[in-house]
Every structure is written in structure tokens, then in C-alpha cells.
Amino acid sequence: MNVIYTDNNATTRVADEVIEEMLPFFGGFYGNPSSMHTFGDRVGKKIRQARQKVADLIHADPDEIIFTSCGTESDNSAIFSALNAHPDKKRIITSNVEHPAILNLFKYLRDKKGYDVVLVPVDKKGHLNLDLLYDSLSDDTAIVSLMWANNETGVIFPIPEIAEKVTEKGILFHTDAVQAAGKIPIDVKDAHVDMLSLSGHKIHAPKGIGVLYVKKGIKFFPYLIGGHQEKGRRGGTENTVSIIGLGKACELAAQQLPIMNTQVKELRDYLQNQLLEKIPSVSVNGDLENRLPNTLSIGFDAVEGESILLMLDKEGICASSGSACTSGSLDPSHVLMAMEVPFKSAHGTIRFSLSHYNTKEEMDHIVKTMVPAIETLRAMSPFWKDGKLV
Amino acid sequence: MWEYTDKVKDHFMHPRNVGELKDANAIGETGSLNCGDALKLFLKVDENERIVDASFMTFGCASAVASSSALTEIIKGMTLDEAAKVTNGDIADYLGGLPKEKMHCSVMGKSALQKAIADYRGIQIMEKPGEMVCECFEVTDLEIIEAVKANGLETTEDVTNYLKAGGGCGKCLGRIEEVIASVKAEG
């Protein structure tokens, strides 16, 4: 069965060019980049090039790039570094729609370490309440961490504007740009951010490689203490193969940014409009304008997400749902709840996230599958009668 | 992804007895749109209290649909007395088992069946004592107090993990916190 992959905010296909770039370093070129011999430095040289390419994607200097194992490690490293830099400051600020890598870390710091955590809310469109955010900035604030774009809805926060306001008060600012990278332009110099997290597997590099950008002049305390790798800022022998792959992926992402905002965006809009046109009682979550070009979070009244996913799965279509239906918790995602998306559509929310590998034919197949799937599920739903929600 | 048995998948993709039963004379409803799953069970019961037909309408995940479908197959042909003895374990067994996180789907089947039987017999289901706190999972304040005391539960998350209370729409979480606080205040 052909796979139609529209779950690119979960993970992406490793680009063929990236695999080609990495292959020699799985095999013959196994040297340690730190070694004092030419054989090891063949790898060292490739890593220096990769670091440059990663830096180029976000307009940073190579010295400001630290390779980590994943986005979560980058997020944790940034926050713990800020807390170590300011042991006297007890307030930390984030939003209530963050990825668990930040949200659960902040809850841990609140519950176990006594930090005063401010969770800034969002409105129905997913926009951050900026007044509340700015009012909560205090002399006691160690760091503000906000995602650049939301993984579930694709809604983009105005990071350059926020970062400027936060940093001019002398407060550290970190952004989780895992979803934004490769989808919208990122310029760390222009954006005034002190630290920024990236993840390789969201931009067609392999899993297990992440990046933390730390602005020059910002005091950094390593999270993994060990050898001199990454200039002592992250111990542990480099994940050489993945770093080399990530370099290539960043080079490609920079080239493909215009495609993302034309071709991919058009496909996403086409899928959205077809679903809205062909299926009644459907609503799109989040701000339609201020949104990642590849992401569509769409709710179908009176049906449940997992059921829809399984119907899609039968046709080889990969997507995700906005709810986690388990015994402990039946609630829709914290993001949809924070946006006060009504239960009637929150439980039936599906996220389609596209990449440049998708085609119009695939979108047509998704629509062709979705129309009868929703009809079937609504036919058995006690909340659907005579073509409408009851 | 959940590890569903072939039988669960079959009953989800090809559910038996779906839809409203026009001449039903007993109906049992449980769950709600807010909670993320709901089941409406229709029974046609003859003069000897035998279930001659059954159907369902379900909003929920694959295992909720499969549990509903399985339930209707199990109870068709049973007398109400026999049906009253069907447990949620019987529903899960019929499907070759359910993931443990999904057992509540079979509990929902059992609950709708009890309500349908009570509906036919015209009896009020005995209300649980105490004040209803969690409407999604029908948990009362007395049950929460008992669980908090017996197990030393401290947070709303503890209560949700233990009783499921608060794990649905979440609107009772504040009330659960109050109940926990009242137990603590008592010492």
C-alpha cells in the first residue's frame, strides 16, 4: 500500500540527499573529530561545514551552535542554563500551549523546585495574551520561553516583537523553534533571541539530533558535563553522522523555504478548502492567516479523532488527532483546550501537516477518503441526526 | 498506536447492529459529547423479557465502537436477567481483550446496558449516595473522600488516575481540589 504522509509535524522523511551525505560516515569514515590525525579530521571538517550550514539557516554564527541529541535536550539545556545563571531569580514564564518538553519541565520546576511559573494564556485563535505576558515580566524573572510556532495548530507567535520587549528588560529569552524551522524564515540576529532550539527530524534529517543556539555573550552552563566537545558546552562524543546529515538538511531547508510558502501552502489551502466544502459542520482551529504554511488543524463535529485516524490508516494516510483517548484522560489536547475549542469539534480534530513531498493527487485521495469516513462515523454517532449536530 | 485485536478492528470497521432501532422499547444512554465518548443502546424486549433485537449509536474511539458492537451481539437472545449479569469483562473477552487504557469503553457498554434494563422495567437506577462531582465518569464526592483517605491521594492527578474522576471534560477539577482540601482540613 502506498503511504500518504501528512504527519510532518510529528516527524519527517529523511531526504535522499541527506542519506547520501551521511552514508560514508556510517562506514569507512569513522574517525573521532577530536582526534589529532588527518583521518579523524576528515570527520571534523565535515562537522565544521555542517555547523556553518545550520548557522546559516537561522542567520547565526557557527560558534553559537551547540549540537544536542534532540529538541527536548535543547529546551532543557536552555532553561537549566538560565536558572544556573540566575540562582536568585525565581520566576519563569512560558505559555500554556507549549510542547511538553517545555510545559512539563516548567511544571516540574514549579512543583518540585518551588519556581513561580507564569503560564501565559492564548485566545480562541491561539494568539498569546501579550498584555498579560508583559505585565508578568519582573526583576525576579530568570527566563521567558515561548514557542515560535505551535505544533498542533501551526499558529505563529510574534517572537521578534516579544523577544525585543523581554530582552530590553534584561531578561533571558528562549524560543522553541522546532516547528518553525524550515517552514518560515528565522533570523536570530534580527529577532533578539538569546537561545533557540531546533530538532533535526522535523526538517528531513534523522531523529536523535538537535541544536541549541546560544547567542554570543550569553553565559551558558552545560547540561551534560563531560569532555571538551562543543567547546565544553555539551559533553559526549559527537553524533557525527547525524550532525553531517543535519547540515545537509539545513542547506536544503534554506533552499526550500520559498517552496514551503508557495507550493506547500497552496496544497494545504486546497486540502482545507476541499474538506470545508465537501463536509458539513467542520471548523479550522487557530488563526488562518498567522499560521505555518504546512499545518491544518481541522475539527469534525460529533465524531472522535481516533476513529477518523483509523479510517485514514486503512487507506495508508498518516495524520494525527487532537485528542488522547485513554482511561486516565479523555480530554482533547491542552492546546485545543487552552484555545477553548468547543468539545463538539475538539474531540474530532485531525492535524494534517504537509511537506514538499506531498502532491495534489494525495490531497484528492485524502478528501476522497475523508468524506465517506466522516459520513460513516456520523451515521453511528448519537450526536448527529438529519445532517446536523444534535 | 494501540494494539487492537483483529476482532476489535473487525467490529470497528464492520460494526454490527448500528443505528436507531425504530421499535425499541428500552433505551440506555451513557457518556456525553464533552467526555469524548458516548453510547446510546436500543433494545427490543418481548413479553417474556427476552431481548429480540439490539442496536447502538456510539461516539468515540475504535474500541468504544467495537465494545458497543460486541455488546449488542452478546445480549441478543438473552433474557433481561441474563443480560443483567453481563460484565464489562465479558465484553472485553468477546473482543479478545482491550488495551488496559481502553477498558473504560467496555465499562461504558455495561453502564448503558444497566440503564436500558432499568428503563424497560421502569425502575429508577439507585442513585449513588453523595453529591455527583464528575459527571463524565459518575464519581461522587463520597467516593473521592473515601479514595483520598484510603490511599493518601494528594493531587487531582492522583484522583484522576485512581477513579478517572476529572479525566473527562475536566470541568470538575476545581471541585475535586476542594474535596481533597476538605479531607486534608479534617486531618
Image: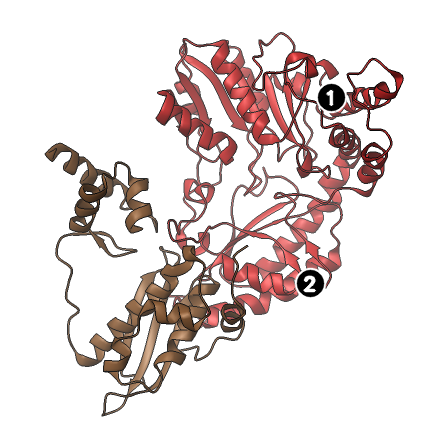
Helix, strand or loop status at disc 1: helix
Which of the two marks, 2 or 1, is nearer to us in this view? 1
* Residue A169 in view of the camera: no
Q: Can residue A104 be seen in this view?
A: yes
Q: Which residue is drawn at 30% across and 41% down?
A: B158
> Residue A50 location in percent, x, y?
78, 25
Reply above or below: B67 against B72: above
- Please report the residue visible at 73 percent of the width from the left and 21 percent of the height from the top: A55
Image x and y of residue A180, in percent = 63, 33
Marker disc for residue B5: none
The residue under label 1 is: A55
Q: Quadrant of residue B77?
A: bottom left
Q: Position of residue B55 (x, y in %)?
A: 38, 79
Instruction: Kindly identify the residue that appears in the image at 56 percent across and 30 percent down.
Output: A72
Local crowd at mark 2 within 10 Å, few (<14), some, or many (≥20)?
Answer: few
Indicate which disc, 2 or 1, sits on the residue closer to the N terminus. Answer: 1
Q: Chain A is drawn in which colour?
A: red
Q: Check the picture and name the quadrant holding the N terminus of chain A.
A: bottom right
State whether residue A79 is above or below residue B153: above
Determine whether, in the image, residue A129 is placed left or right of residue A47. Answer: left
Q: Mark 2 sits on what residue?
A: A365
- As drawn, B164 above or below A112: below
Residue most extreme to the right: A38
Residue that extends furthest to the left in the rendered view of this protein: B186
Q: Which of A309 and A187 is in front in this view?
A: A309
Give me the chain letter of mark 1.
A
Type of amino acid at the residue the image marks with label 2: His
Mark 2 residue element: helix
> Which tint is chain B?
brown
Foreground pick, A137 / A131: A137
User: Is B126 on the left-hand or right-hand side of A348?
Assistant: left
Give the residue type that dot 1 points to: Ala
